[in-house]
Image: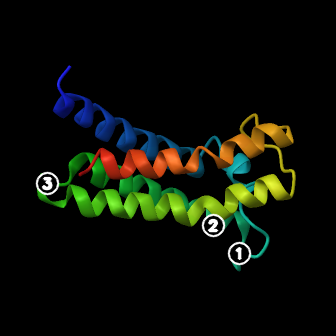
Amino acid sequence: MKSNTIKKIAKYGLGAMLISAGIGHLTFARKEFQAQVPDWVPLEKDDTVVYSGIVEIAVGTAIIAAPKKYEPIIGEIAAGLFTAVFPGNIAQYKNRRDSFGLNTDNKRLARLFMQPLLLFWAIKSTK
């Protein structure tokens, strides 16, 4: 398979993942996402989940639909989003909050190491 094809699959997969996660924020996984909102966020947990879901849907849609010349900036925006939500993953670990099957300290810790992979995915699939 050519690297260009792999890149396209990765780009569309990332966009679809973000759209799906955003829909989850707004519907079926709302409570699960609330467990990841740090206590220091000055908004209600549900509001934070709704707003971040809208952003995820917008970024996922942009990754899929934006013209090629905008792909690198969209990738950087996606990487910024993954960086911005990382404190939520830390809070989930630190406060031992169960959600999405992350019901042990080891699972929550392993999740922290997934974030750099998401950053890499966002940058590499859009450059």
Spatial CA distance of label 2 from label 3 is 29 Å
Identity, as a three-letter code, of the amino acid under mark 3: Pro
| Along the viewing direction, whichever of 126 and 52 lies nearer the viewer | 126
Residue at left offset 29%, top offset 60%:
74
Residue 50 lies, in percent from the top left, at 58, 61
Q: Is residue 109 above or below residue 46?
A: above
Residue at left offset 13%, top offset 52%:
68
Spatial CA distance of label 3 from label 1 is 34 Å
Residue 5 lies, in percent from the top left, at 19, 29
Q: Which of the 4 image quarters holds residue 70?
A: bottom left
| Along the viewing direction, whichever of 50 and 6 lies nearer the viewer | 6
C-beta proximity under 8 Å, tags 2 and 1: yes
Q: Earlier in the sequence, mark 2 or mark 1?
A: 1
Eye-nearest disc, 2 or 1: 1
Which residue does the numbered mark 3 point to in the structure image? 67
Question: Is residue 105 found left or right of 89 in the rendered image?
Answer: right
- Circle 1: is it few (<14), some (14-19), or many (20+) Cα within 10 Å? few
Residue 76 lies, in percent from the top left, at 35, 62
Which residue does the numbered mark 2 point to in the structure image? 48
Question: Is residue 102 found left or right of 27 in the rendered image?
Answer: right
